[in-house]
Image: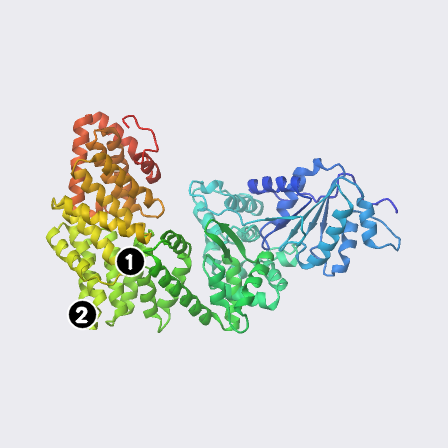
């Protein structure tokens, strides 16, 4: 065998022609895996920066390999039979014999301590996998680093996905100027327009551009090229059709890299027809989705449901779908750029409206399942699930509201999701959608009645007692007209809630009592019967009927324990702490209040947490822990500003708050009170909750 004519001990790494930006954590992760595994495959969508990241890594580790780092680019290769020859050529092997290429290559590698990089394998996966397997089995000191849009499917392979760059907003604490997507754009913009400077005038537009381009390096770099003729602001404005805008930015790049469309189109060509069809249909999802959703929405006679799992797996392997695993399960995501491409194909297939309707049908059924299960032991699951499905719910709602004949479905979906709007932290959004849907459905109906009492509930959660009362009264009137007795009962309950917030205790007592008395449907525990009992206990406490209030709550908490209900039970614990405080049992009151706040940690219930902290401030003051009470008061003032109307404007709460302030000021003196108050004002909701729960040390605790 002849000596390799092009061989150099240090290898043949191409020079890095551009600066490398970001990816610090990814590079460290790759180094670690390369140290532990002999085969590492770097996967990701077209244009995400797989090759560039691997090249940067190779330059960083080249000194660790005695016989060099070698780079073989297979991007232009179309014939899988030429894989071995192409790699041999990259290694500089000059063998004129008739021996098999595999023998030549394996013999040359021998026991050399080297790293072989095989770049762009996805269109030649089978040939690459066979060669890599042979080389690694016969050459113990060889390591292989591959880039591909799908893995090589070898048993000892370690796959490292390359995600898009972080975009502005991914890390709320991060400065826009240090975001890696923004830094990449600035670096490439400086190369195109030498006097380009990232400053306060253009940072907003650059950040928006990077967000719109999903943090995909190829897209960001192609956009930067457009600065030769356009301002950043103009590029952002013209991004409605990002594919045509970015076309033809470079004549020297490989054809698939000349446009974002080409990069994505090549991934599309790698898919078989069924995978392409699924890709198109999955474009109806927003954000991420579960496998069950894909099976329901995308399946038909062309794509049977039983095939969807394998097809999803194929799209994950080809880096079309991102996969996310956490404690809540596995979810999949088609990022916006790929979704737009799929959506174009969906339009060409004439399936957009049918897929949108199936998407709506799925999320309507899901919402109804969540509503039916909300008062049971899987409440936390449904809280997490519907927050995860938030983006898809929005898309389904928008489709229903825009599509003739589907507006009634929007009402049903919105109404079924009352727990999402009230319990999951989306009251403002729920109100806007409900008002819009009610406007689109002016005819009296049972669906409209339900939407009206849900709207009343949402408005109460915002502290808008007048608006809540208006919606509840309208619900009651329309429910009588259509003979909807269930809506009449719930309207009474919502009227009672509004009256409580307005301080009309007599009216609240009467209305809540009616709702409780006539609520004979045991399945309707929430939002009817159980919240009505808790609210009636608040009325009784305010009227001085403490024994009756506590008895109601004790019975109610027993039902919660039997049913596995948590959300309303946290309010029951808060209400119980009020009755115990009023009877000077401060230690028991603190125990109940703390239990309520602990439960609220499972939910995004800012309102309920703040109400619990209000009562805890009073408990600490009653227990003469005035400094802790003052800190809570400071934190409460600060946190109510972002949560909404303090104490919902309810007189029975605002009066207690003012009295607590005066007690602390008198006990501490103005200077000490102000110091403690200001210290508390610097605490966020998690920190002040930890303080109130005794998880932080306090001087007087």
* Front one among 142 and 155: 155
* Front one among 558 and 72: 558
Q: Kindly report the distance in space between the C-alpha atoms of the residues bearing marks 1 and 2.
A: 24 Å
Quadrant that contains the C terminus: top left
Q: Is residue 419 visible?
A: yes
Q: Position of residue 689 (x, y in %)?
A: 32, 38
Identity of the residue drawn at 18% across and 49% down: 537
Q: Residues within 10 Å of mark 1 (few under 14, many from 20)?
A: many
Left or right? Give the position of 678 relative to 144. Answer: left
Q: Which residue is mark 2?
A: 480
Q: Position of residue 666 (x, y in %)?
A: 16, 28
SS at mark 1?
A: helix
Left or right? Give the position of 419 relative to 357. Answer: left
Q: Disc 1 vs disc 2: Cβ atoms closer than 8 Å?
A: no
Identity of the residue drawn at 11% across and 46% down: 543
Q: Which residue is mark 1?
A: 431
């Amino acid at each position: 065998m002849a000596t390799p004519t092009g061989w150099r001990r240090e290898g043949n790494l191409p020079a890095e022609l551009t600066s490398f930006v970001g990816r610090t954590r990814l590079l460290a992760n790759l180094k670690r895996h390369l140290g532990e595994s002999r085969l590492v495959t770097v996967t990701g969508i077209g244009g995400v920066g797989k090759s560039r990241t691997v090249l940067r890594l190779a330059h960083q580790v080249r000194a660790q390999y005695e016989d060099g780092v070698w780079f073989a680019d297979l991007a232009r290769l179309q014939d899988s039979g030429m894989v071995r020859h192409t790699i041999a050529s990259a290694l500089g092997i000059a063998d004129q014999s008739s021996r098999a290429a595999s023998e030549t290559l394996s013999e040359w590698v021998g026991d050399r301590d080297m790293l072989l990089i095989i770049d762009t394998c996805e269109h030649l996966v089978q040939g690459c996998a066979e060669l890599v397997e042979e080389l690694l089995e016969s050459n113990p000191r060889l390591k292989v680093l591959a880039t591909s849009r799908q893995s090589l499917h070898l048993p000892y392979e370690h796959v490292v996905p390359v995600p898009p760059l972080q975009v502005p907003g991914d890390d709320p604490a991060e400065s826009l100027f240090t975001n890696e997507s923004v830094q990449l754009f600035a670096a490439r913009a400086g190369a195109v327009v030498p006097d380009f400077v990232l400053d306060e005038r253009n940072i907003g537009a650059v950040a928006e551009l990077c967000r719109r381009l999903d943090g995909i390096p190829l897209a960001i770099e192609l956009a930067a090229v457009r600065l030769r003729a356009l301002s950043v602001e103009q590029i952002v404005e013209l991004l409605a059709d990002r594919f045509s805008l970015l076309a033809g930015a470079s004549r020297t790049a490989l054809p698939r890299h000349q446009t974002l469309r080409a990069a994505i189109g090549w991934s599309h060509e790698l898919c078989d027809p069924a995978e392409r069809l699924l890709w198109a249909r999955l474009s109806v999802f927003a954000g991420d989705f579960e496998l069950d959703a894909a099976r329901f929405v995308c399946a038909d006679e062309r794509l049977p449901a039983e095939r969807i799992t394998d097809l999803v797996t194929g799209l994950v392997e080809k880096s079309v779908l991102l996969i996310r695993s956490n404690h809540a399960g596995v979810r999949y995501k088609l990022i916006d750029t790929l979704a737009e491409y799929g959506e174009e194909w969906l339009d060409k297939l004439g399936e957009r409206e049918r897929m949108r309707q199936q998407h709506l049908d799925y999320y309507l059924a899901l919402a109804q399942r969540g509503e039916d299960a909300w008062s049971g032991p899987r409440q936390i699951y449904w809280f997490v699930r519907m927050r995860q499905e938030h983006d898809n719910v929005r898309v389904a709602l928008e489709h229903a509201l825009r599509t003739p004949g589907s507006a009634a479905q929007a009402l049903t979906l919105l109404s079924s999701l009352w727990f999402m709007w009230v319990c999951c932290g989306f009251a403002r959004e729920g109100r806007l959608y409900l008002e819009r849907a009610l406007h689109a459905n002016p005819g009296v109906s049972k669906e409209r009645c339900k939407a009206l009492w849900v709207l009343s509930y949402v408005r109460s959660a915002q502290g808008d007692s007048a608006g809540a009362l208006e919606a509840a009264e309208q619900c009651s009137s329309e429910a009588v007209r259509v003979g909807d007795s269930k809506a009449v009962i719930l309207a009474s309950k919502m009227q009672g809630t509004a009256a409580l917030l307005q301080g009309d205790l007599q009216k609240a007592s009467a209305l809540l009592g009616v709702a409780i008395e006539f609520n004979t449907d045991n399945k309707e525990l929430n939002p009817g019967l159980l919240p009505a009992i808790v609210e009636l206990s608040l009325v009784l406490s305010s009227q001085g009927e403490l024994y009756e209030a506590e008895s109601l709550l004790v019975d109610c908490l027993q039902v919660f324990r039997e049913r596995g209900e948590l959300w309303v039970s946290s309010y029951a614990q808060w209400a119980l702490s009020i009755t115990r405080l009023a009877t000077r049992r401060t230690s028991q009151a603190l125990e109940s209040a703390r239990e309520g706040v602990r439960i609220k940690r499972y939910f995004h219930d800012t309102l309920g947490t703040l109400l619990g902290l209000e009562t805890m401030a009073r408990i600490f003051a009653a227990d003469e822990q005035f400094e802790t009470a003052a800190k809570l008061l400071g934190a409460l003032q600060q946190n109510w500003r972002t949560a909404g109307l303090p104490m919902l404007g309810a007189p029975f709460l605002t009066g207690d708050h003012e009295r607590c302030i005066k007690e602390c000021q008198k006990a501490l003196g103005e200077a000490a009170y102000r110091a403690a108050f200001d210290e508390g004002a610097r605490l966020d909701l998690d920190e002040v909750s930890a303080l109130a729960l005794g998880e932080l040390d306090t001087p007087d605790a």
